[in-house]
Amino acid sequence: MTYDISWLIDDEVIYVHYHGHTSTEELIQSFVETYDLVESSPRALVHSIVDLSGLSESLKPFDTIKAVRAAKSHERVGWNLAIMPTKSMPIELAIKMTSSIIKSRNRVFSTVDEARTFLQEMDPTVHWENMNYDVLAGK
């Protein structure tokens, strides 16, 4: 498996870390698992931080769009924040296209800290004091 998914903050923020080479099938499976986590949460909105820093090969925009179309989008998805330390035009293009397909709110940041600061401003109801730092340490 070339991704890990867990709660960064239980029932509030999901952390997805992709590493190595991720196939279209794995991408679809990760979307299904993320959907299931959102479904299990009692919150009105669940946010995601998606760390792409460990990818050894860029996701192809066509494969990403194919995966997004194959997976369901949950109505309670809040912000999807992508982490890309190095700019990647193909990945940024894929994020923009998938954002318009599933009508989601996406942003790209260089670090998890930048994404966290943004999300703190956008949703002050998130309980950052409950953040599981072990999730980030395990990436």
Image (spheres, rainbow, N blue to C red):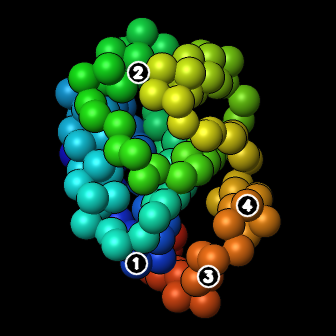
For image coordinates 48% across by 20% down, the residue present is 101
User: Which callout, 3 or 2, points at the residue further toward the start of the chain?
Assistant: 2
Q: Is residue 48 above or below residue 132?
A: above
> Viewer-nearest of labels 2 and 4?
4
Front one among 80 and 50: 80
| Secondary structure type for disc 2 | helix
Q: Which residue is under mark 4? A: 122
Q: Is residue 124 left or right of residue 23?
A: right
> Viewer-nearest of labels 3 and 2?
3
| Secondary structure type for disc 4 | helix
For image coordinates 62% across by 22% down, the residue present is 96
Structural distance between the alpha carbons of marks 4 and 1: 18 Å
> Which residue type does callout 1 highlight?
Asp
Structural distance between the alpha carbons of marks 1 and 2: 27 Å
User: Which callout, 4 or 1, points at the residue further toward the start of the chain?
Assistant: 1
| Secondary structure type for disc 3 | helix
Q: Position of residue 15 (x, y in %)?
A: 45, 60
Structural distance between the alpha carbons of marks 3 and 1: 10 Å
Q: Is residue 33 visible?
A: yes
Structural distance between the alpha carbons of marks 3 and 2: 30 Å
Q: Which residue is under mark 3? A: 128
Structural distance between the alpha carbons of marks 2 and 4: 26 Å
Q: Which residue is under mark 1? A: 10
> Viewer-nearest of labels 4 and 1?
4
Q: Is residue 103 above or below residue 32?
A: above
The quarter of the picture where residue 7 lies is bottom left
User: Which callout, 3 or 1, points at the residue further toward the start of the chain?
Assistant: 1
